[in-house]
């Protein structure tokens, strides 16, 4: 009788241990899909005049790789007037999204006004992460070359915040 009770306790203990171990397992793989990223730019020319084009060299730096991550680019012009196009010739329309298919790319901004000009470029992934780059150009008239500077401001937005 004592053997039977000890055997039952032992079997119950093994079953309890098995249930505990199996319930701790998760059949789903923990795959990270969203990684932080940053767009780095080379220095941009300081002044621009009407009709002149400024080259903006960009590199997308990824914090990790996930095959299904897609990036888009768009822009908004808050001051002045101009055109923004990419290195394959696509002229961007303000606030329209365009696929970003390369990690190293160039943007070309052409001035269409003689005023100060500011553009905000947004690079976003399909998981809600975003980086904003702001480019401000001062107008330089051919006969009046004043010292002015282009400024680049980077704003990162994380989908987790």
Image (cartoon, rainbow, N blue to C red):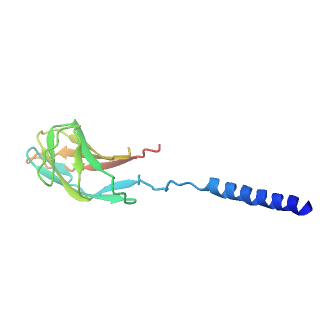
Nearer to me, 12 or 103 = 12
Coordinates of residue 12 in the picture (x, y in percent): 77, 56
Is residue 82 found left or right of 3 in the rendered image?
left
Q: Is residue 156 left or right of residue 104?
A: right
Camera sees residue 145: yes
Query: Which residue occupies 23% across, 58% down?
Result: 102
| Residue situated furthest bottom in the rendering | 3
Whether residue 119 can be seen here = no
How far from the left and from the top, in percent, is residue 72?
A: 27, 47
Q: Quadrant of residue 117?
A: top left
Whether residue 132 sits left or right of residue 98 in the image: it is right
Q: Quadrant of residue 62?
A: bottom left
Residue sitting at x 33%, y 59%: 61
The residue furthest front is: 1
Say above or below: 121 vs 9: above
> Picture quarter containing residue 1?
bottom right
């Amino acid at each position: 009788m004592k053997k039977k009770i000890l055997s039952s306790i032992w079997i119950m203990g093994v079953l309890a241990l098995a249930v505990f171990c199996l319930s701790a397992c998760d059949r789903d793989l923990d795959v990270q899909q969203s990684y932080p990223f940053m767009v780095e730019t080379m220095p941009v020319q300081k002044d621009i005049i009407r009709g002149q084009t400024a080259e903006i060299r960009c590199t997308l730096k990824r914090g990790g790789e996930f095959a299904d991550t897609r990036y888009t680019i768009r822009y908004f012009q808050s001051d002045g007037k101009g055109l923004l196009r990419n290195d394959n010739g696509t002229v961007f329309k303000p606030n329209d999204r365009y696929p970003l298919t390369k990690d190293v790319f160039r943007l070309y901004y052409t001035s269409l006004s003689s005023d100060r000009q500011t553009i905000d470029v947004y690079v976003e992934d399909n998981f809600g992460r975003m980086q904003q780059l702001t480019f401000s150009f001062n107008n330089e008239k051919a006969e009046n070359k004043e010292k002015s500077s282009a400024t680049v401001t980077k704003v990162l937005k994380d989908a987790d915040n």
